[in-house]
Amino acid sequence: MHKNLKQLRRFLGMASWYRKFFEDFATLYEPLTALTRKNVKYEWKDEHWAAFEQVKALIATAPVFARPDCSDPFIVECDASDTGLGSILLQRIDGEDRVFCFASRVLSATERRLSITEREYLSVIWSIEKFRPYIEGYHFTVVTDHHSLVWLQNLKHPNGKLGRWSLRVQSYDFDIVHHKVKDNVVPDALSRMYETDGDETAAIASLSVDESIKDPWYSKKAKQVVEDPTVYPFWKITGGRLYHYRPDPTVDEDGQDKDAWKLVVPCEQRERILAECHEEPVSGHLRFRRFKTHQRAALKYYWTNFYKDTAHFVRNCQICQQVKVEQLVPAGLMGKHMVTRPWEIAGDTMGPFPRSTQGHEHVLIFIDLFTRWIECIPIRKANAKTIKRELNLLIFLRFGIPDRFLSDNGTPFKNKLVDSFLEAHGVYHGICAPYSPKSNPPERVNCTIKTMIAAFIETKHTTWDEHIPEFTFAYNTAIHEATRSSPAFLNYGKNPEPPRTTRREIEQAVRQSLEEAARDDWQARMERLDDFRAHALENSRAAQERQEKYYNATHHVMEYKVGEKVWARNRIISSAAQAIAAKLSPK
């Protein structure tokens, strides 16, 4: 007897998988399907019991059941749920699936604590050992709806629990094939036959990982997804957390991008996420406007009013208000120069800053004018010898020789040593117009890096160089306003993971099982990297047109109202004796 409507629907779905083998199946089915209709009270009676037994008997006899034919390959379909394992042994004969055996069992209390990948692999191990008398000595195929299991068969150096389990079936000759969940109906139904009413409550309770979820909208949406996932195809529950599918159309043209699944954040955790994506050194207190903090968070997270909440958080960041100055648009027309391929380089220096505890006084910056990738390194002296050495180490020996190198007319760059070095490598040295720093592309980067430094040093100005690598990482992994992609993505086809994120902590248990799928996804992206770069070039042209429009507009006039709160400009004078730099102080 089925205790509730959900169990009955599961049985009917499994039985319908074989309905093509029977005549008048709908007539036989009618007493059971009547119970599933809307506004019908669920009461299990003799007529339902009779129909259930008759359907079950038909499934367990020919033509669904058949005798094994050793000349045809065997197929093992298996699945695991939170409470049980399910499996069937079959052969595909004349284009039709013929079943030899159904099997299922309940999970022990210890097994229920296993991760999703471990439970799914346990179903593979158990199914193979269960059907050993039939499949031993023959090549067969294992079908699973858990894609991460495919990599386990190619595990070269087994270790840990999954490694020990893989050794148990090493003597069998089989392949693991992934099927979509919707095609794995029968094993799924068998694995869930041990679920009780209490398991449904537990499924919702498991949404709390580190703390109970208090957000009513989150709990309601999670419950809806658990109860009827087919109604919510763009939502899923993984590892007890809710995810929403929001693909990037420039990356996810075929709908296979794993990064399109964003972790849904309940209201009590949103401030923590925004702080992580804005206030950490690897996030750099970047602006909200268009594609900085907002897009960094949107790469991994989602919630309702996401854009509005991010804008409010950044605009009310006290540190940003202290160290950032609103950029006013000056008069004049903008010239045009469009870079059409990666690694046309520009360079500049920042400083001098107060001598740090490491002895550094300047920052050397190189930027790829196409992808906007930057290389930043603190240096002791901004002289020709240092520029030549770092240009060779950071650029030439890592990314190859560029056709063109652009710099200002300062003596660290414009000198015989640097000119002869560039000439020896066949690199044209372009010089920006004197007294026109805006014509030098790294100047905007300088402002961004300087703001990051100011956001983190507080009063310890001799430690300004401690986070330069993190700031470089923050810039290279942020979505650029012009290209609509991050510099890292345009160079390597992926966005590197920051050292620590809330999502990384939550997903740590299943991270190993996702590595193979992530590598395949990265390889596919690399094959399309030229397309991404062409798309970035189109975005850069559009951005340049927008910049030209606003550059050529009149100056912005700020109007203040009586009673408004405003920030007063802080006039700080640099002092070597006090180790204070005006450019790093609150504005």
Image: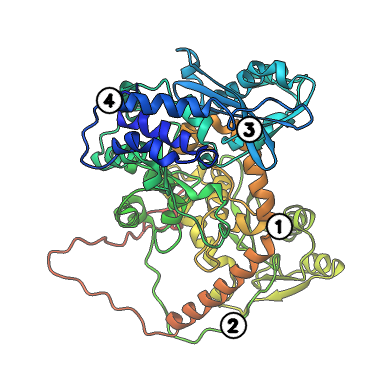
> x, y percentage for residue 154?
74, 31
Secondary structure at numbered mark 4: loop
The x and y percentages for residue 210 are 37, 27
Cα distance, mark 1 to mark 4?
57 Å
Asked whether the residues under the numbered discs 1 and 4 touch, taking CB atoms below 8 Å apart as contact, a structural biologist would say no
Q: Secondary structure at mark 1?
A: helix
Residue 538 position by quadrant: bottom right
Q: CA distance from mark 4 to mark 2?
A: 78 Å
**Which mark's residue is nearer the viewer, 3 or 1?**
3
Amino acid type of the residue tagged 3 in the rendering = Arg
* Quarter of the rendering containing residue 236: top left
Comparing 496 with 512, the one in front is: 512
Q: Toward the viewer: 136 or 442?
A: 136
- Nearer the N terminus, badge 1 or badge 2? 2
**Above or below, comparing residue 294 to residue 72 in the picture:** below
Q: Which mark is residue 98?
A: 3
Q: Which residue is mark 2?
A: 336
Which is closer to the viewer, label 2 or label 3? 3
- At 62% across and 21% down in the image, what residue appears? 127
In the rendered structure, which amino acid carries the disc numbered 2? Answer: Lys
Left or right: 341 as drawn, with respect to 179: right
Is tag 3's residue or tag 4's residue first in the polypeptide sequence?
4
- From the image, which quarter does the N terminus lie in? top left
